[in-house]
Each structure stands twice: as structure tokens, then as C-alpha cells.
Image: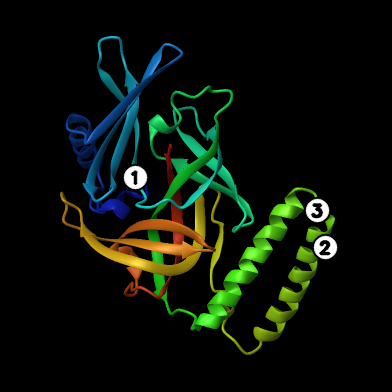
Amino acid sequence: MHDYLRAVGFSKVQHKRDLQRLLDMVMGSPDSEFASGCGGTVYAEKCRDFVSNAGITVRGEVDEHGMFSYEYYFPHYTGHQISLTDDVSVEKISEREEYDGMCDVVNLGVSLIFHMNHLMDYADMNPKSRQISSVSVRLSALSISGKVILPVVRNDSERLKRLRENESRNGMIAAARQGDQDALENLTLEDIDMYTSISKRIKSEDVLTIVESYFMPYGIACDQYSVMGDILSVEEVYNQLTGEKLYQIQIECNDVLIDLCMNAEDLLGEPAVGRRFRGNIWLQGHLDYV
């Protein structure tokens, strides 16, 4: 069973026969489907939502008689808003037609890797050069482990100061990547000052007060992360088939917007705007072409 099935409301699917009935339902009456020929083989994708923007995707091949042969499936969730606009590189991650997208995000300081949710986003590209310039990305995530924690109190002047500091730092990071030695030295000095400040504060303050937000790799899978960010919106929804209660939460993590979907049973605490979400996520993405 896929670990993240419960995140879209299928926590009770425990046996192969139950899973097969679910996949037959998706393949028999999909909400959307897509097919693309590549090297004489026609790859196809069938998707069905069981709650707003979230459901099951089944992928496989179509033979010369038009018969669809199922290869693999995964639960999906599509973001409601544009998270970022950047150059995206698409890389194959397994023997099957499964791909991850990758882009450099200055705010995070790392290469952001996410599962490509839609076959149409990359199926017709040249396999040797799957590069997309300046494309809008809708980032979303599924989670099976998370908790709600209290926010850090900030007044308007502190928020404005933090915003200016982030803009200045992002500018220096961009310049350092272009080879600017002055920017590199300034970043090094900032890191030293930050380390000194944290060393002093940690003696009398809680670590979650000092660390307001973070985004870092989690486990061995390159598209899974441990995150903490501010909750911007919360919506309670229910799986149309199972009736299980889900939370669809929009979080801001290091100035990056992510739409998150998870089973209410897997979230510790009551989510509310202004509080923070902390947990582990499987990051997904959908490309919006202009």
C-alpha cells in the first residue's frame, strides 16, 4: 500500500482486494485522463479526485488495441495557488514513467525537489533535455505526521524588519551564486553573527521561539521534507467515498507557499490561522504554462 493513501482519506484500505476495487473505480470513471506516445509506446494517466484537488492517479501503458494496462498508482494533491516561478529541470527517478522536478529556490538555499503530479507536464518533452524556463509551479504536499504549535508573536515593525532582512539576504545569495566575492564574505559574516546570537538566546529561550520556520530534507527520499511554517488558511473537507475528515492547509515556509492535505487523525492539535504547522511532507508539484 502507498504510505500516503491515508492523507487523501483512504486510511482503511489495508488489503490488496480493497486497493484493486479503488483503482478499478479510478480507471473506470476518471475525472481526467491523458496519453502520450514516446518511442512507440503510449503512456497514459487516469486521475480521479475524491475531495477538492486530491485523489488517486493511475499510470500505465495503452496497447495497440487501445487497452489500458495499469503499472503504478499514487495519491495526489494539486495546489490552489502559484508558489513560485523559476526554471525547472525534470529528471526520471525510476524505471517506470515517474519524474521529479527540481529548481533552485533562493529563499530556501537548497535545490527544491518535488514529485511531478501530471504526465502532461513533461511527456512531450525531449527526454535528453527536460528543461523548462521561467515556469509557474503550484507546490502541494501530503502529510501523515504533523502537529500544530503556537506562533511567535511579532508586531508590524518586526515583520517589516524581517521582510527587509530576507530581501537583502536573498539578493546577496543570488549575487554570491554569480561569483560576487563581497556578497559571499557578507553572507559568511552574517552566518557568524547568527551563530553567536543563537548561542546566547538558546540559554534562556525555547528553540521553537528562536527558529520561526524551517525547510529541510527528511529521510532518504529526495522529495520528502521536514518543515515548519505559518498557517495562512485552513479548510475542513471530507472524502466523498469514505467520509474521512481531512485538513487542507496553506502554509508559508521560508517565504514559499505550500498547499498541504492530510488526514485529521494524523494531525496533533487544532489548526488555525496564525498558528504554525510542523511535520513531515511528501512534496508534489504541478506546472502552470503561460
**Where is mark 2, residue-wise?**
185
Q: Quadrant of the N terminus?
A: top left
The residue drawn where x is 21% and y is 39% is 22
The quarter holding residue 163 reads bottom right
Question: Tags 2 and 1 in contact by the CB under 8 Å rule?
Answer: no
Q: CA distance from mark 2 to mark 1?
A: 43 Å
Is tag 2's residue or tag 1's residue first in the polypeptide sequence? 1
Residue 281's spot in the image, x, y percent?
A: 44, 56
Determine whether the residue tagged by mark 3 lies in a helix, strand or loop: loop
Determine whether the residue tagged by mark 1 lies in a helix, strand or loop: strand
Is tag 2's residue or tag 3's residue first in the polypeptide sequence? 3
Q: Is residue 183 above or below residue 273?
A: above
Mark nearer the viewer, 2 or 1: 2
Mark nearer the viewer, 2 or 3: 3
Q: Quadrant of the C terminus?
A: top left
Q: Amino acid at mark 3?
A: Asp
